Amino acid sequence: MYNNLKGKHLISTQDWTLPELEQLLAVASRLKQERQLGIPHNTLLLAKTFFMLFFEESTRTRNAFEAGIHQLGGHAHFLTPKATQIDHGETAKDTVKVLERYGEGLGIRKTFGTGNAYMREIAKWSKIPVVNMQCEDYHPTQVLADIMTIKEKFNNELRGRRICVSWTSAPNYIRPLSMAQSLVLAMPRFGLDVTLAHPPEFKLKPEIMETAKANAEAAGTKFEVVDSMDAAAEGADIIYAKGWGPIVYTEDEKEGLALIDKNPGWVVDQRRMNMASRDSIYMHCMPYDRDIEVTSEVVDGPHSVVFDEAENRLHIMKAIMAATMI
């Protein structure tokens, strides 16, 4: 039943049908159970190679893919533009036409500029599956781990539950829109009502919002936008809050940082967690700015599932590789 996933690119969850995503989540759950039971699965991708091309640094993504391919019996190659001929101008087509002769899968992380266009150009020419390890618009591997975590915490009963996707005042640099956009796109498809909260200048891309609304309508779920974290947190089952830049409003970095500093009160603290439902969970893709985006009381408290969420990155990455690599 998984043959339909073989060789399939994963640039955005929007590129996959809901049954395909559910198939992938089932594989991830099975691989997680086997690991917990000590059942090895190191012959699934025996002697297979997964290339990881990173334009930026990574903790969870890199290590989850490296550990995952090792546990499946294969090997990961860590690549950077500087350590390849990409920085010297080699085209996307030429890069992937060589790599596909050496291995069976390729992941790319490029979160600023034209990362999504670059990945799709790679995928256009590639005979091996191309995985988006995060671009400026999407972070599919993370949002799938998030869905896996939510399913586990709520016994797979998602319909009728509400997720608060909120902006936070994370300082110092302009973060991409990819995480928030991936959440509002994917969560309605799995039966969750979504409340998106942000200051007026921190809107998501219009085409993403239109697709998210269409996803909610098709799934029979609710999608709303508010300008108050309190309003979004009230009665929520899940609070998922992280910073992103005012990229739709301005491309000027200095102006963007000033707008972040203008909204210092957007932080998840215990008062806001108390506003949520009694069995609510706090989520973040990490890294978070402790006591700026979220208080230590919350992130270390009983509602926090951030480390379970981070662990599920491993199982999702393994499922993606096991299901798609030839």
Image: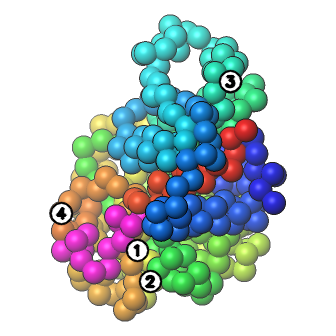
Residue occupying image coordinates x 76% and y 45%: 6
Query: x, y percentage for residue 312?
Result: 46, 61
Residue occupying image coordinates x 35% and y 44%: 59
- Tag 3 near tag 1, CB within 8 Å: no
Q: Secondary structure at mark 3?
A: helix
As shown in the figure, which amino acid type bears the numbered disc 1?
Ile
Disc number at residue 100?
A: 3
Tell us which disc is closer to us: 2 or 3: 3
- Tag 2 near tag 3, CB within 8 Å: no
As shown in the figure, which amino acid type bears the numbered disc 2?
Ala
- Tag 1 near tag 4, CB within 8 Å: no
Query: x, y percentage for residue 229?
Result: 37, 73
- Tag 2 near tag 1, CB within 8 Å: yes
Which residue bears the numbered disc 4? 291
Disc number at residue 236?
A: 2
Q: Is residue 77 magenta?
A: no
The CA span between labels 1 and 4 is 16 Å
The CA span between labels 2 and 3 is 45 Å
Q: Is residue 237 visible?
A: yes
Q: Secondary structure at mark 2?
A: loop
The CA span between labels 2 and 4 is 21 Å
Magenta residues span 297-309
